[in-house]
Amino acid sequence: MDIKVFRTCEEASAYAADLVEAVIRKRPDCVLGLATGSTPEGLYAELVRRHQTDSLDFSQVKSINLDEYIGLTGDHNQSYRYFMDSHLMNHVNIDRANTFVPNGTAVDLEAECRAYDQKWLDLGGTDIQVLGIGPNGHIGFNEPGEILHADTHIEVLTQETIDANARFFASADEVPRRAITMGMRDIMSAQQLIVLAFGAGKAEAIARFNDDQVTPDCPVTFIKLHPNATLIVDEAAAALLK
Ligand code: F6R
């Protein structure tokens, strides 16, 4: 597994953008697997810049996101659909009909999960998957525990995740308690994985890369099993790496 440490998250985001750009230029109709949260904001800003100044073409690109809060409509400013539109989709020439985020207000949430796995299959899987990491080591919303799930499923968020994400809401009480998330299979089946982590709050999760253990109590450790994964971190997140 490739580990790249950069001085700043801006440098790291530019490197991540290089990897995503290479996939788009090689395969213009590629499928991007996307994450939300503060970590990939610099990556998306850089992709928008490259679209505007270097003609990076998204016209045939498709995207599928990892997760969505249950109970938030796509026009809620903390929904992940809203995040993707405002940080990327509204600023590049992607066909919005080719961008997929789970529907967190589906009447039948189980059916939405099954349909989302089928959507991923119909797209032919993911060429490159962008991942952030929760301070507790979650990827997507696959939370630490005794088991992990392969399929897209409903996850009850841990208190640690609710607390970590409270900064985006008026208070922790407003953070949705459940989310739809892709399971480990769709994530791990991507042709290429890039895992981004910035800041001291991620250092303990990144320290789990000091050994070869793979364990559901830290879901990001599963990426050690992937043959084409790159961990992209800044110096603060790398502080406990040996
Ligand atoms: C979001 C997602 C989450 C975040 C993680 C880190 O789509 O999949 O796993 O990547 O919670 O969030 P930030 O980047 O806000 O620290």
Image (spheres, grey):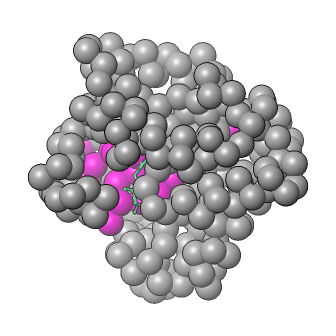
Is residue 200 positioned above or below 58 on the image?
below
Q: Residue at x 17, y 43 (%)?
A: 177
Residue 133 in percent (x, y) is at 42, 59
Give the quadrant of residue 203. bottom left
Give the quadrant of residue 210. bottom left
Q: Which of the pair 121/10 is nearer the observer?
A: 10
Residue 168 in percent (x, y) is at 31, 58
Q: Residue at x 55, y 33 (%)?
A: 64
Residue 107 in view, yes or no:
yes
Q: Residue at x 54, y 60 (%)?
A: 41
Residue 157 in percent (x, y) is at 21, 47
Q: Quadrant of ligand 1?
A: bottom left
Q: Which residues are magenta?
A: 127-147
Q: Please tell me whether the stretch drawn in magenta is mainly helix, strand or loop.
A: loop
Magenta stretch: includes residue 119: no
Magenta stretch: includes residue 135: yes
Q: Which of the pair 105/177 is nearer the observer?
A: 105
Q: Residue at x 62, y 41 (%)?
A: 90
Q: Quadrant of the N terminus?
A: bottom right
**Left or right of residue 52, residue 147 in this image:** left
